[in-house]
Amino acid sequence: SQTIHQWPATLVQPVGSPLSLECTVEGTSNPNLYWYRQAAGRGLQLLFYSVGIGQISSEVPQNLSASRPQDRQFILSSKKLLLSDSGFYLCAWSPDPRHTEAFFGQGTRLTVV
Amino acid sequence: AQTVTQSQPEMSVQEAETVTLSCTYDTSESDYYLFWYKQPPSRQMILVIRQEAYKQQNATENRFSVNFQKAAKSFSLKISDSQLGDAAMYFCAYRRRGGSEKLVFGKGMKLTVNP
């Protein structure tokens, strides 16, 4: 069966520090991968999605970036965190373009102090 | 651009009763999917139910059912025999068929179930 792993679960980082959140999917190949952010009391905002290795589409211009170095690995990064980067980050995957729903990881609560 | 609107930020229901969560969306597409996701306090996003726009029949999953009104662009979720475990944030989501397959979410609604 397919599983998605996202880590760390919680993270407290100072302003200006770098960020690296990792997400991996097991039990499938060539998934579509997504990074969402959920600010307090708000819905989910799509940040990045990827349909293949090295293929990244950005939805919202900001100081975050994403990379997909391997088929089932998706990384969210920042060189210098801002206070406004605080939030709950969710990684998700879809099995293939014909599959309709997305499956989510456990999420990472990021607090920038 | 597609948008999803959940106009009720919070609702409450008594255990064992029925509650309906509303959702409207805006799209110029004719072929798409609609979803309801549940986010309990653990923050894990869980798919509750899915509706395909080309299907006129409303989707049903055990105690969960939808009322899909394509012309009105309305997609409500009915929870029957509410249970304490149903307490969560509920998100309505839209996804265009094909293309980039992005999920567009509403802002969510907090459901409280009273014992």
Image: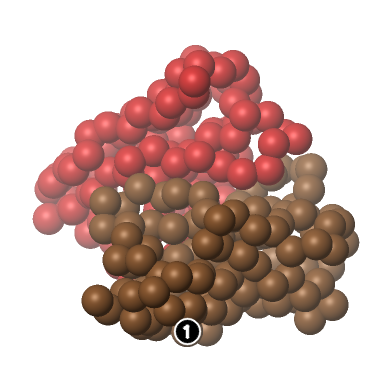
Q: Position of residue A53 (x, y in %)?
A: 58, 20
Percent x, y of residue B35: 61, 57
Q: Is residue B93 visible?
A: no
Question: Residue at coordinates 32% horizontally, 44% vertically from top-left?
Answer: A107
Q: Nearer the viewer, residue B28 or A20?
A: B28
* Residue B72 visible from this viewpoint: yes
* Quadrant containing the N terminus of chain B in the rendered view: bottom right
Measuring from the top left, give residue A61's x and y in whole percent.
Answer: 50, 53
Q: Residue A102 versus residue A34: which sits nearer the camera?
A: A102
Say left or right for B27 vs B102. Answer: right
Q: Residue at x 23, y 49 (%)?
A: A110
> Tag 1, which secondary structure?
loop
In the visual, does A55 lie left or right of A112?
right
Vertical placement of residue A50 versus A53, above or below: below
Chain that is coloured brown in the picture: B
Quadrant, the C terminus of chain B: bottom left
Within 10 Å of disc 1 (Cα), the crowding (few <14, some 14-19, many 20+) is some
Query: What colour denotes chain A?
Result: red
- The residue depicted at 65 percent of the width and 77 percent of the height is B24
Quarter of the figure with residue A3: top left
Q: Is residue B77 above or below residue A6?
A: below
Q: In the image, residue B57 lies at what x, y percent?
A: 80, 62
Identify residue type, mark 1.
Answer: Gln
Q: Which residue is nearer to you in this view: A111 or A96? A: A96
Q: How many marks?
A: 1
Q: Quadrant of residue A79?
A: top left
Quarter of the image for residue B28 reads bottom right
Q: Is residue B15 left or right of residue B56?
A: left
| Residue assigned mark 1 | B8
Q: In this rendering, is residue A59 above or below A50?
A: below
